[in-house]
Image: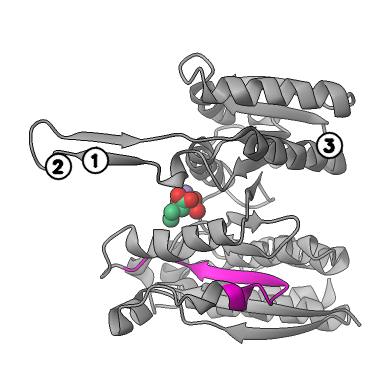
Amino acid sequence: MAKYKIALLPGDGTGPEVLREGVKVLKAAADRFNIDIETEEFDFGGDRYLATGEVLPDSAVDELRGFDVIYLGAIGHDKVKPGILEKGILLRLRFELDQYINLRPVKLYPNVETPVKDKGPEDIDFVVVRENSAGLYTGFGGVQRKGTPYEIAVQEMVYSRNEVDRCLRYAFDYTQKRNKRNTLALCGKTNVLTYVYDLWERAFHEMGEKDYPGIRRDYYHVDATTMWMVKNPEWFDVIVTGNMFGDIITDLGAMVQGGMGVAAGGNINPEGVSMFEPIGGSAPKYTGQNVINPLACIFAGQMLFDHLGETDAADAIEKACVAFLQSEHCVGMSAKEIKEKGSSTEKYGDAVADFAATV
Ligand code: IPM
Ligand code: MN
């Protein structure tokens, strides 16, 4: 019997509410496929920080290294200045656990509404591989003469060849394994960022030509990428890009696939401990109301099982979500609809868990 230790980080805002349902569904699928999961909860987040002044204890990262995987709710607290928790918890874990890939599927499921006119599930199904450890997120830079009219602020986009190569390697392998359209698109800005994206472009073609002759290579500037994601999303199979562009285009991707209520992602260290999360944030406005959509977190659970190699359990979660979306239990994707139509986060989780145990 396969056995996994899963660290739970409910975090802030609606994080605990959605993670509760995610774990419920994970357990339903685990029971069905004889997978033993052992969970341990950690209280990192805004409330702990406000009470103790500590963002993340130094022992935390080492402790988390002892788990097979991490399942995260959300980070971001309305009473804590933006940046403290995001950098101190989310980004610190991504960096210190060297989760250098952020994998973000953009998939429209039947019965989920997309704001993109005349496009359906057959058109919207691609994956963004976002580099997750470097670029503009490294914190290189500085400020001088702060607060004066002569202030200078610098924030540098830093990439080593190794960081680019390992991300590209993952993206090519992923595209090959996915075997859908066998097309990998590099999203960059070679017309302006002539150092960093020149490095990406050279490395991309070198690796593709040498090791992946069966994978077609496309290139798009980031501004054009956003345009085509809306106009012709069916062109995309897998997109690989740097950290900042990946952050931006995956919020657009989330909208294209039906909103933050369904968008999930994985912070992946292919050789280490990975962390799965809904990408929508902590939604402070809805905290404690039991109306936030838990599907994104449930899809993150699907990715978690997939990552562990538990494909039957992962498939069962996906099928359960599809069945749920077509059932009378589903009253909408937004917290507003769930609230107005008298359903709840918990009812959503219960229904998906029932399907996960059966369909
Ligand atoms: C994301 C978020 C984070 C990021 C923030 C909260 C630091 O926007 O996961 O996309 O920029 O990566
Ligand atoms: Mn983001």
Q: CA distance from mark 3 to mark 2?
A: 51 Å
Q: CA distance from mark 3 to mark 1?
A: 46 Å
Asked if the magenta segment contains residue 56, the reply would be: no
Of the two numbered discs 3 and 2 in the rendering, the one whose residue sits closer to the viewer: 2
Estimate how packed mark 2 is, as few (under 14), some (14 to 19) or many (20 or more) residues with alpha carbons within 10 Å. few
The C terminus lies in which quarter of the figure? bottom right
Q: Which residues are magenta?
A: 62-77
Q: Disc 2 marks which amino acid?
A: Lys
Question: Which residue is labeled 2 in the image?
Answer: 146
Name which residue lies at 74% across and 21% down. Answer: 205
Question: Which residue is labeled 3 in the image?
Answer: 180
Query: SS at mark 3?
Result: loop
The N terminus lies in which quarter of the figure? bottom right
Q: From what the image shows, is residue 127 above or below residue 10?
A: above
Q: CA distance from mark 2 to mark 1?
A: 6 Å
Query: SS at mark 1?
Result: strand
